Image (cartoon, grey):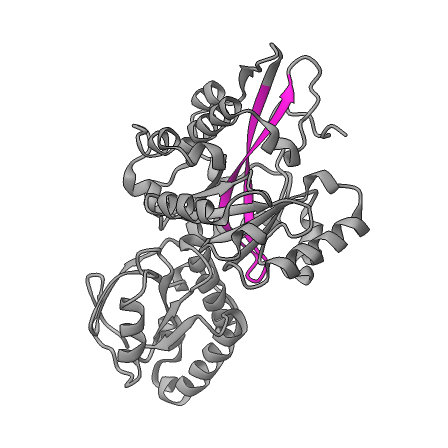
Amino acid sequence: MSRHEGATIDRIATATAAAALDRLAGSDLVERGCVTIISVEAIQERAGDRWPRKRDDVWAYVGRKLDEHLSHQDIRQRLNETDFLIGMTQEEGVAAQAVSLKILEEVLVFFLGSAEQADFRVRSVNRIDGLNVSAAELDPVRIAVARQRVADPAAPSPYRHGIDPEEERKRNPVSFVTAGGETMKVHFALEHVVSLQHNVTAALRVQPTVSHAATGRVIPTRFFGKLTDEEAAFIDRSALDFASLFMPKDSRSQPPLIVPASFRSLGGRKGRRELVGREDITAEQLRRSLFIELFDVDRGTPPGRLAEVSALVTAVSRGVFVRLQPVKRAAAPVRDVRLRGLTFDAADLAGFDSRLARLLVAISMEAKGLSPALVVQGLPSAEYFGMAQVAGFTHASRRAIAAGESERPAA
């Protein structure tokens, strides 16, 4: 049986473990919370004297489950008789932990007939120093929240629990007056961005919806690029105000946030100062938990300028996504820019299934190989996730509707 001194695994028995640990120690996966350890100690305990005869079968089955759920880029390594190290390269924190928990659950059910909470032994690795691995116990109930999005797509996000409703009312909705004197209202909603491969929540995304206060008529997302600089900057600030309510204090306990922002705003020093100069979000929270989604990049955006702004924003945040527009050669400006992901908003195509399917395939083919993640957001329901996965997208989200928000965009 493996023994633990505090949070340190003190017996690394396999000869190949050193290479895997060295590879992980040289990456940022530990810092991102993407390295976990699952333990089959519960099976060993139940087996008793039969464990030496049963051990090889357990190891083989764990190996099959690792191959089933992980990609070839992911790292998997048996450390000793009961502990298996998992390093996921394409998922963040809680999502990686949820995949590990799923693997362990399937192994426990196969050998024990059921999976009790007390049998779930999952740890998050927080330090690797040679063969010395330090890890913290994880709460399986908390991790399982990342898999709840399938149960009821209309239900509120479980990550809203603990949010002060009065504080949210102060920040959602907000209003501004255009240069023409018209009052516009902005509602914010929280969307679950789901890993299509692993069926877990990989990130939370803030979705702003802009509407005419007098009529409730919604501005389609494809027209956000036509906002004035001042209007875009106001929405950016307001989106961060709303996002700060959900900013994780510990990146290992909650998915990262994706917050849309204007390329024009963040292209200037003032916009970047407003991003990093907030009192309610620490520099560490920005670096560990916040992705910025640039929503107004188009074919006329200079690639060199995009690369410069992306690098500046990435230096103070988790990374940058760029939203692709529904036009030909939409990916032209991003081809030589290092990004964490590309997004495409499908909300304006609701009700046009055949057109949506064709466009998803076209966008996926154009964006292939340009970033680790390709996200389609604004889908009308989770039933469209299969279509998105077949088209080649890695992640998807359904459009969440904030209280008081009109559900139909303007034509």
Q: Which residue in the rendered view is the most extreme toward the top?
A: 181
State the image coordinates of residue 165 (x, y, percent, origin top left). 47, 23
Q: Is residue 218 above or below residue 358?
A: above
State the image coordinates of residue 91 (x, y, percent, origin top left). 46, 58
Decide whether residue 305 is among the magenta residues.
no
- The quarter of the picture where the N terminus appears is bottom left
Front residue of 191/228: it is 228
State the image coordinates of residue 299 (x, y, percent, origin top left). 60, 45
> Residue 282, can we see it?
yes
> Residue 111, can we see it?
no
Where is residue 208, by image quadrant?
A: top right
Q: Is residue 36 left or right of residue 257?
A: left
Main secondary structure found in the magenta portion:
strand
The residue located at (69%, 51%) in the rendering is: 328
- The quarter of the picture where the C terminus appears is top right
Q: Disc count in the image?
A: 0
Front residue of 71/37: it is 71
The residue located at (55%, 48%) in the rendering is: 193
Q: Is residue 305 above or below residue 98?
A: above
Front residue of 410/11: it is 410
Q: Which residues are magenta?
A: 185-212
Q: Which residue in the rendered view is the most extreme toward the bottom?
A: 53
Q: Is residue 44 above or below residue 100?
A: below
State the image coordinates of residue 82 (x, y, percent, origin top left). 34, 76
Q: Is residue 138 left or right of residue 260?
A: left
